[in-house]
């Protein structure tokens, strides 16, 4: 009986340890280079087993954040903990974190197998055992039998998978990926990102992924953290970010959007309306405070009116046929709008007058 | 641990014998008072200060054995180690008379204590510093301070101490402003110029001529379809493996009073053979021959660094080839050209070999320093003051070069792959370039032919029968009692030279590359100062180094003169900047993410250096070793002050031969040196130079494998 409770207790601690293992917590982290604040007061929490993307334009601090998780940079102030332990001053060598570099950083003088076994050898694993584990990792990324080659004898996609194998063979608490697809050609990218996602799901490692490509971020992530000028602009699931952007920056960065300056007002029923010159649009989903605001019009919110007396009278200024869709630029009284119609041919050529309507359910105010 | 062993086993004070020689054992070995180790000194000879390092070691071992070091304990043990360090140094400096010098034991103890301090310091500091990095930085700094700056400080002190040993600012001032140094009489056509003025005039002349010739060769190399480019490359390398005075010797054989050309011309025209070669003009000719290849190498980089698209842009804007060169390329090259000019100026100021062979009555600073020390009345004060003047001149030029040109060096190299090729030279420019370079190439070739020819004739100018007598005299091998008897006169200095250079070369390369790694890969406070310090030693002329080493290491506490150690040390710190530069250039080619990948994979910075950086740098390492080896063999200026009776270097020996007029023997010896260096460099390149990183190798293997159907 006594034994039984003990066993339960152990089990419970194990569970809580598992929850903490691989979690990442940033508390008010600042990284300064001289006077420049590369990362300026970031708080974030990443849970065990999550795949989180750091997304943002270049220079937003996402790579610096990643490098601080790796321990390649140490924060100027603030604390970083990984797996519940404060690692703020711990250099990369001693962190249980692996990283896949943008350039892959495969050691050109070592064979593929020795590259993958490198980390194991450095932590004192016997050479035969290290090689064995490295073989396993290579077959996990589909490169069994490539061990004897040199990195320069592999294609870009294969090199990338070696870098991945080299990182996961150490069974790290956290896996870091720094723009892993940027050196691959466009067609390979989609395939590789699916592979990465599948592998991450299979081994369940906490993964932080840096990219500036929003489509890539939305495709792979459980959660996206959008950064802007060293701060977190918004964090949430891909759908959250797309459907309820908190700022014009997020709205334009996640998916495509027309941003129209407007005045927000509160209607009698308490919902919001956006006023632009003579037009008013109901924006039922919004809770923005009244005053100057920006109306976010996704291309999907726009449609051509069926009859001529309905909607906003507008003029097509350019129409480009891209095979499965047509890109329109439309001059309207509320501003120039960008619209995508999925159709087989151009229905409204340049310089034709059309009326457009906006779907209130797909509008946002920020 | 090593320190403790040294403390127990090795003699504390400097001893007069090597520790493996029987003499030393006879004199009492470890058990004698003078030869005792630190531990024995404490126990047997009741030397109380010897207890201090023992206590420090105990504290350190205690600290080292505890796994997680508390902050207080680290501070405590660090303090103990520092205290012990100070105590040891003070003890040796003040302890009893006569002052005794550091021995193997104390040197090792000091080193290990020092490293323990840096090690503990790294644990105290922020986490990004690992012990290896901190220790390396401190170690390199300490070495540079001890072996570059401390000796120079000694010169500074010596400059104000006159013969009677009293302090004299006035005396120093009188020497420094003397007419024999600064007189400009020769410019006014009256009398001789002062040595400093000679040096400066010579520097300007040499810098101008080498820069023009170097530029012409660089243009010939990269902007024409000159067929003899491989020959050109070989000629550019030859002077680097030529001891500096050899060209001077060859010039004497050609243009000296009994010279080949002089004879012919005086025979034809009935003129009397003159001594024009022995003086400023002769030195100028010699230095131009010697330094043009350096200017050529610098300027080839500059000429090839001009982005072809700029020149192509100029041509699409209606500029012809010659105005493109004039208005676009040359202005872009200006910083590079100025850089080559200043480099040649420094080289010329520091040169010793050519002036000593060809100088005749016209002395320059470097030779005047030499004669002030070895001359009839050895005048250390004068030598020190002259050294300071020479040092001030080279440092000024060095500063100008750093300040103005350091950054504009590679303005147009963008790192992006540029399409297109550099434009060719226009007809007129081509004529000028060919007109300058072809005769000079022939002349250089002639010089080397002369070197060889001079070594196989009996007596130059009088008896031109071919003979191998000189080689035999220098390198005869005989048999005696079943062993080889190195009978030739040169063997002794030859083996000394080879062994000392072979010891110095890897150490130089190692220290240089370590420094380069610290500079490129590590961020630390004072990094730019550190870089400046390491590069500064490059600007210190060899003569000055020689004088400073004599002054600094002649007496206790550091007594090294006359030993091989001082030669090795001298080479290491003279040639280290070359290793640093090579290492920095090579390391900048290596993507930093390789290092970072290794770090995130759990390797510390030492393992990263060992397993990632070093293997990838192998070509750079080989060339650094080869280059330091060559520089050690060919160096004259510093060596000539430091050689002792036991350790005579080849170059110093040859200078002696030249002074005695044994030109044939001197040239034969030099030829052998050149051949040896060629062989060594080739072997190094072939054996280790290749790294297998490329695909071609494997494809090549596959292709050579027969296909079985």
Image (cartoon, rainbow, N blue to C red):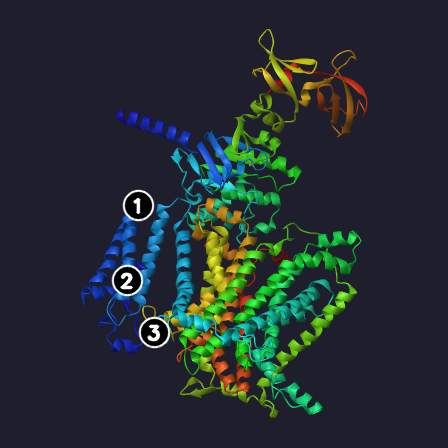
Quick check: marks 1 and 2 in contact, CB under 8 Å?
no
Q: Is residue B429 visible?
A: yes
Disc nearer the start of the sequence (1/2): 1
Q: In the visual, does A97 lie left or right of A357?
A: left
- The image quarter in which residue A89 lies: top left
User: Which marked residue is nearer to the observer: mark 1 or mark 2?
Assistant: 2
Q: Residue at x 43, y 40 (%)?
A: A96
State the SS at label 2.
Answer: helix
Going from the N terminus, do you reach mark 3 or mark 2 first?
2
Q: Split into 4 quadrants, where in the image is the N terminus of chain A?
A: top left
Can you see residue B625? no
- From the image, tell me which residue sits under label 3: B165
Q: Nearer the viewer, residue B427 or B59?
A: B427
How many residues crowd mark 1 within 10 Å: few (<14), some (14–19), many (20+)?
some
Q: Secondary structure at mark 3?
A: loop
**Residue with the mark numbered 2:** B90
Residues at marks 3 and 2 on the same chain: yes
Q: Earlier in the sequence, mark 3 or mark 1?
A: 1
- Quadrant holding the C terminus of chain A: top right
Work out how far the residue at label 3 is from the one at label 2, CA to CA, in angstroms.
24 Å
Instruction: Mark 3: give few (<14), some (14-19) or many (20+) Cα within 10 Å.
Output: few
Residue B442 vs residue B29, the one in the foreground: B442
The chain letter under disc 1 is: B
Tag on residue B69? 1
For image coordinates 66% across by 37% down, the residue present is A187
Q: Are marks 3 and 1 in contact (CB under 8 Å)?
A: no
């Amino acid at each position: 009986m006594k034994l039984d409770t003990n066993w339960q207790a152990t089990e419970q601690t194990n569970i809580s340890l598992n929850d903490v293992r691989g979690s990442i917590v940033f508390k008010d982290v600042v990284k300064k280079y001289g006077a420049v604040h590369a990362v300026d007061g970031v708080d974030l929490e990443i849970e065990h087993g999550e795949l989180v993307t750091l997304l943002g334009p270049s220079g937003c601090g996402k790579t610096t954040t990643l490098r601080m998780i790796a321990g390649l940079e140490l924060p100027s102030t603030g604390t970083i903990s990984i797996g519940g332990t404060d690692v703020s001053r711990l250099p990369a060598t001693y962190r249980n974190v692996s990283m896949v570099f943008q350039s892959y950083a495969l050691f050109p003088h070592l064979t593929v197998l020795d590259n993958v076994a490198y980390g194991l050898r450095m932590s004192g694993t016997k050479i035969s055992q290290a090689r064995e584990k490295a073989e396993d990792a290579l077959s996990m990324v589909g490169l069994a039998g490539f061990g004897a080659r040199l990195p320069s004898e592999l294609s870009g996609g294969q090199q990338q998978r070696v870098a991945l194998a080299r990182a996961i063979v150490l069974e790290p608490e956290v896996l870091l990926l720094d723009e892993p697809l940027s050196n691959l050609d466009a067609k390979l990218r989609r395939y590789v990102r699916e592979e990465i996602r599948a592998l991450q799901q299979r081994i369940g490692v906490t993964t932080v992924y840096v990219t500036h490509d929003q489509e890539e971020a939305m495709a792979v992530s459980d959660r996206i953290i959008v950064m802007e000028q060293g701060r977190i602009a918004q964090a949430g699931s891909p759908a959250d970010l797309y459907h309820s952007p908190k700022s014009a920056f997020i709205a334009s960065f996640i998916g495509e959007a027309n941003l129209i300056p407007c005045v927000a007002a509160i209607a009698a029923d308490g919902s919001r309306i956006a006023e632009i010159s003579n037009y008013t649009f109901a924006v039922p989903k919004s809770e923005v405070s009244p005053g100057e605001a920006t109306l976010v019009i996704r291309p999907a919110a726009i449609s051509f009116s069926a009859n001529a007396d309905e909607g906003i009278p507008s003029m097509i200024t350019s129409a480009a046929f891209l095979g499965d869709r047509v890109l329109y630029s439309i001059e309207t009284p509320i501003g120039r709008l960008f619209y995508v119609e999925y159709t087989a041919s151009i229905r409204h050529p340049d310089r034709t007058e059309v009326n457009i309507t906006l779907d209130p359910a797909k509008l946002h105010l920020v | 641990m090593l320190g403790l062993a040294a403390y127990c086993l090795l003699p504390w004070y400097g001893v007069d014998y090597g520790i493996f020689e029987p003499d030393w054992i006879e004199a009492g070995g470890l058990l004698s008072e003078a030869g005792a180790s630190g531990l024995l000194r404490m126990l047997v000879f009741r030397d109380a200060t010897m207890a201090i390092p023992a206590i420090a070691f105990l504290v350190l071992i205690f600290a080292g054995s505890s796994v997680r070091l508390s902050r207080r304990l680290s501070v405590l043990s660090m303090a103990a180690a520092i205290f012990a360090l100070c105590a040891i140094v003070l003890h040796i400096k003040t302890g009893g008379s006569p002052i005794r010098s550091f021995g193997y034991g104390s040197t090792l103890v000091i080193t290990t204590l020092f490293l323990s301090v840096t090690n503990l310091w790294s644990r105290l500091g922020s986490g990004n510093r690992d012990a290896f990095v901190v220790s390396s930085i401190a170690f390199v700094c300490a070495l540079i301070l001890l072996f570059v700056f401390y000796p120079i400080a000694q010169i500074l002190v010596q400059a104000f101490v006159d013969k009677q040993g009293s302090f004299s600012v006035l005396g120093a001032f009188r020497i420094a402003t003397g007419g024999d140094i600064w007189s400009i009489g020769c410019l006014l056509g009256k009398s001789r110029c002062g040595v400093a003025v000679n040096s400066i005039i010579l520097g300007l002349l040499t810098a101008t001529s080498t820069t023009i010739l170097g530029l012409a060769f660089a243009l010939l190399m990269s902007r024409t379809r000159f067929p003899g480019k491989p020959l050109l490359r070989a000629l550019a390398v030859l002077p680097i493996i030529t001891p500096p005075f050899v060209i001077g010797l060859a010039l004497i054989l050609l243009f000296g009073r009994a010279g080949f050309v002089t004879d012919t011309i005086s025979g034809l025209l009935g003129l009397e053979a003159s001594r024009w070669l022995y003086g400023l003009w002769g030195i100028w000719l010699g230095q131009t021959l010697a330094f043009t290849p350096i200017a050529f190498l610098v300027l080839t980089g500059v000429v090839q660094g001009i982005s072809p698209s700029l020149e192509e842009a100029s041509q699409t804007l209606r500029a012809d080839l010659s105005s493109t060169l004039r208005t676009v390329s040359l202005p872009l090259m200006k910083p590079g050209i100025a850089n080559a000019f200043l480099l040649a100026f420094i080289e010329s100021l520091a040169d010793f070999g050519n002036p000593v062979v060809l100088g005749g009555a016209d002395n320059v600073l470097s030779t005047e320093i030499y004669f002030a020390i070895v001359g009839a009345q050895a005048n250390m004060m004068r030598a020190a003051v002259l050294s300071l003047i020479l040092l001030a001149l080279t440092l000024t030029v060095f500063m100008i070069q750093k300040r103005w040109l350091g950054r504009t060096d590679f303005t147009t190299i963008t790192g992006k792959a540029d399409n297109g090729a550099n434009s060719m030279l226009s007809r007129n420019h081509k004529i000028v370039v060919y007109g300058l370079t072809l005769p000079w190439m022939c002349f250089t070739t002639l010089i080397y032919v002369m070197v060889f020819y001079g070594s196989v004739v009996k007596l130059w100018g009088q008896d031109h029968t071919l003979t191998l007598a000189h080689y035999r005299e220098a390198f005869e091998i005989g048999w005696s009692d079943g062993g080889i008897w190195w009978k030739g006169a040169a063997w002794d200095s030859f083996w000394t030279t080879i062994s000392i250079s072979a010891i110095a070369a890897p150490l130089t390369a190692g220290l240089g590359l370590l420094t380069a790694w610290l500079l490129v890969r590590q961020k630390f406070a004072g990094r730019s100062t550190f870089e400046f310090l390491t590069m500064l030693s490059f600007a210190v002329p060899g003569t000055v180094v020689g004088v400073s080493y004599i002054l600094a290491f002649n007496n206790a506490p550091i007594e090294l003169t006359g030993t091989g150690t001082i030669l090795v040390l001298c080479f290491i710190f003279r040639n280290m900047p070359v290793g640093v530069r090579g290492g920095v250039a090579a390391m900048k080619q290596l993507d930093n993410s390789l290092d970072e990948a290794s770090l995130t994979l759990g390797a510390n910075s030492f393992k990263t250096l060992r397993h990632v950086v070093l293997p990838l740098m192998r070509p750079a390492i080989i060339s650094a070793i080869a280059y330091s080896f060559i520089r050690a063999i060919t160096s004259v200026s510093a060596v000539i002050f430091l050689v002792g009776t036991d350790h005579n270097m080849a170059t110093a020996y040859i200078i002696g031969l030249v002074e005695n007029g044994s030109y044939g023997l001197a040239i034969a010896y030099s030829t052998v040196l050149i051949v040896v260096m060629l062989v060594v460099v080739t072997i190094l390149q072939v054996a280790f130079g290749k790294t297998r990183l490329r695909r071609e190798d494997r494809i090549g293997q596959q292709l050579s494998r027969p296909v079985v159907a």
